[in-house]
Image (cartoon, rainbow, N blue to C red):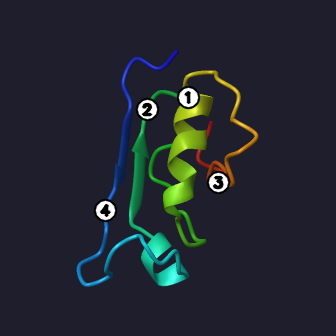
Amino acid sequence: MAKALFIGRSRRLGQGDHVDPTDEVMTIPYMAYAPGIRRGIRIESPARVLYTAPTIARLLDLPPLDSWIGCTPEGIFC
């Protein structure tokens, strides 16, 4: 189990609410720090809000829920 966990995400200024789930609104700056996550990598594909729950679940050795449509970003785990 992770001893420390940080998942940072931020809405960009001027993007509006998450009421309209467009790519412009749902693509976010994304940072993750925890044991088992590779250091110093850059996610080249657009990061999505939907990555957060599956990433936390994987860090805690929990299975993702079938209802989740997000996934863990490729290549962030050791």
Residue hosting label 2 = 34
| Mark whose residue sits in front, 2 or 1 | 1
Q: CA distance from mark 3 to mark 1?
A: 15 Å
Name the amino acid type tagged 2. Ala
Q: Residue at 31% of width from left, 68% of height from top?
A: 11
Outermost front residue: 19
Q: Report which residue position mark 4 lands on.
A: 10
User: What element does badge 4 sit on?
Assistant: loop
Sequence-first tag of 4 and 3: 4
The amino acid pointed to by label 3 is Gly
Q: Earlier in the sequence, mark 3 or mark 2?
A: 2
Q: CA distance from mark 2 to mark 1?
A: 8 Å
Work out how far the residue at label 4 is from the one at label 3, CA to CA, in angstroms. Answer: 17 Å
- Mark-to-mark CA distance, 4 and 1: 20 Å
Numbered circle sitting on residue 59:
1
Cβ atoms at labels 3 and 1 below 8 Å apart:
no
Q: Is residue 25 above or below residue 73?
A: below
Which of the image's four quarters has the C terminus?
top right
Say which of 46 and 67 sits in front. Answer: 67
Q: Earlier in the sequence, mark 4 or mark 2?
A: 4
Labels 2 and 1 touching (C-beta < 8 A)? yes
How far across and down, in percent of the image, does residue 64 sit?
69, 35
